[in-house]
Each structure stands twice: as structure tokens, then as C-alpha cells.
Image (cartoon, grey):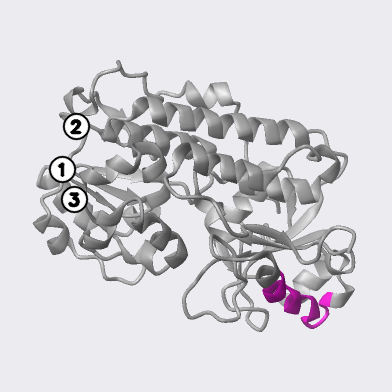
Amino acid sequence: MTNHVARPSRRDLLALPFALPLAAAVPARARAAAPFTDAIGRPISLKAPAERIVLGFNFEEFTAIAGPAGWDRVVGMSKTLWSSWRTATYKRYLGPIPRLAALPDVGNTDDNSFSLEKLLSLKPDLVVLAEWSFSVLAQQVAQLEAAGIPVLVIDYNAEIPARHVASTLALGHATGQVERAQALAELYMTKLTDIQRRTAGAIRKPSAYIELGQGGPSAIGNTYWKGMWGRLLDLIGADNIAAGRIAGAWGPLSPEYVLAANPDAIFIAGSSWQGRPAAVLTGFDADIETARARLRPYEQRPGWPGLKAIREGNLFAIEHGLCRALFDYTAMQYLAKQLFPDRFADVDPAAELRRYHEQFLPVRFTGTWMARVAPVGA
């Protein structure tokens, strides 16, 4: 069974009811805030752009949309989700945004440390939650809204283009940066439209397998279907071998099935996790040789030397944070470039990622975010 995803046009998405009008060029703090909707269509009403925000996730997206100065509006955050999940990235942002270090931590739903009492003590006028946190905090959300504190839901994890656009525009509206948000939403849709134009009409769908490389080759990591990497494969028109083979949006896939499916390409999602010495290392502080050295042992997994992807050198590392980001179009470009090489010869995903950092983020782009197990032609 294949999980089909509709391919909406850029014009369609930016014309949806939640698309926000461009605001007049007046200071954000003086601008009246019109009602708007969040990523899941909930109406949000603010008297003015929020001044005391508690931010639950998507910290880089918030930075791109609100700008570094937008953090002056943040009074608390789910800090562990950034400082521990993406330590190298968090440390980079401490330079241009030093107040991150002093921001209170309100906990999070991933490790059941979320504290409503701590959050309320910060007297926020807006709480921003990722959909996956919002979905398990129904009681707390009701209490917040009863106290007159609006909750804005964002969702980049689902990898549904409409939610990407809605999340971006909603954050722009909430922080008084609607023009910047509109530019980012249009950039995302322009890139997605170009990717899908290039892959449309392919005679066959190349097959791919994506696995989380947190535990190294001795551990069978999660693969993805209905969200994150799984949805990205759907959006570019690839055949995801995990589709219909795992119970939920993510989970491990049977090693025997991977061998039977014999995918055209295999992608191992890496990052800069702490205390994971066997993990595939990618991101700001990863050099290309270290990334490849962590990737090579996967070639020797039981049965893998006989796989088509391994025989042809189509084993790749890719930064896991790219599967739930506003700049995930760079991940789609990389996946598509390996699966449809003749259609993406003129596309440089790493250069696109560098350009995004230069235009919208306050940190210098360095490191290795995408890598083949061996150089082309080696």
C-alpha cells in the first residue's frame, strides 16, 4: 500500500484562507494584530504581536521568521529539545543570541517534564506548541486558554506543505514579521514546486529506504512513512519501501524486508546527538571524512553487501533535523538528486542550505549535512 500525497501548487497554498495579507511597513510593536489561524486551522486572536512568548519547538524556524531580535519576545522554552537533541546547533546560536542560555526551561512532553506551573509563572501572552506536543496536552491547553493565554500550534513534522505555509505565516503574524514570513513561505513553495516539476512524469519510481542512524549499524533504527522522511519521499515521487510496512508514522522495519525490497538507494539520518559514539555524525561540526567513517560500517550489515544500493555506492548520510524544518526543501533536493540524478544535475542542495543560512539565519553555515559513503567515481 502506498501513502499518496497530493501535490498542491504554490499558488493554491499561498491563497489558502490562512494566508496572511502583507502588513504595512510600520513597527511591529505598534501594529494591530488581526485574527489569524494556526497550522491546524484554529483561530488565534492577539491584541498586538506577542511580547511574552513560550516556545516549545522549531527554534530555527522561529529565528528565521522572527529574526534574532524576535528572541527578545521569548520568556521561556522547552530548552532540552534544542540544547540536548541538537547540542551543536544550540551552541552555535548562543553566539548571536546569548540570552538563550538564561531562558527558563518549561520542560517538554517527550520526556514528560512539561510543567504548566513553570510556564504560568512566566506570565506569557502566547504559547507556541508543535502539534505533537499539543496533541497530548489537551487538559493543559484548556487551562491556558481559560486563563486567557492563546496557544498557537505549528507543525513542520507532518511534512504537509499546507501546514508548513500555515505555520510560517502564523509565526510571522504573531511576532509582527508578516513580510519576512511571506517571503519564507514563498521560497519554500517555489523550491517544492520546482522539485516536483523535475520529478513529474518519471517512467518508474526509484525505491529508497531511510533509517535513523542514532544507534549505529548494530541497532535497527526507525524508518518513516506518514510524516517526516516518509512524507518527503512521497513529495518527490519516490517509492518508499516502508510505506504500509510499519504501524505508525515511524518505527523499525524488518531487516529481512529491507533485503527483500532491495532499494535503489539507502539514506541514514545522522546528527550531533550527545553520548552516541556510533551514530552517523552530521551537522555543523561534522567533517566529511568522519561522516563517511560512521557510515561505512552499514555496508557490512548482514546481507547488505548484496543490496543494489550498496553494490552501486548509493548509501548516503543526511542530517536528521532536515526532515522537519522550513528549509527541508534542501533535503528533498538531495534525496531527489540521488534518485533522479539526470533531472537534478544543476542543483546543489548544500549550496542551497548555505544560501538559506546566509539570508535568514544568524549563524554561519559549516560542516557536513549530506554525504555519499564514497566520492563519486571512487
Q: In the rendered image, which quarter is residue 154 located in? A: top left
SS class of the residue under badge 3? helix
Give the residue at x 47% y 27%: 183
Question: For mark 3, what is the residue?
Answer: 142
Q: How many residues crowd around disc 2 within 10 Å: few (fewer than 14), some, or many (20 or more)?
A: some
Give the residue at x 74% y 76%: 298
The one of 183 and 153 positioned closer to us in this rendering: 183
In primary-sequence order, the first of circles 1 and 2 is: 2
SS class of the residue under badge 2? loop
- Residue 208: percent from the left, percent from the top? 75, 57
Separation of marks 1 and 2 at Cα, in angstroms: 9 Å
The one of 308 and 91 positioned closer to us in this rendering: 91
Q: Is residue 302 magenta?
A: yes
Q: Is residue 76 magenta?
A: no
The one of 259 and 139 positioned closer to us in this rendering: 259
Answer left or right for 149 relative to 330.
Answer: left
- Residues rendered magenta in the picture: 292-304
Q: Amino acid at mark 2?
A: Leu
Give the residue at x 45% y 60%: 89
Q: Check residue 46 in the rendering and tell me which mark sits there, or answer none.
A: 2
Q: Amino acid at mark 3?
A: Ala
Question: For mark 1, what is the residue?
Answer: 125
Give the residue at x 17% y 24%: 30
Mark 1 touches mark 2? (CB < 8 Å): yes
Q: Is residue 48 visible?
A: yes
The vertical placement of 338 against 311, above or below, is above
Q: Quadrant of the C terminus?
A: bottom right
Answer left or right for 264 relative to 364.
Answer: right
Separation of marks 2 and 3 at Cα, in angstroms: 17 Å
In primary-sequence order, the first of circles 2 and 3 is: 2
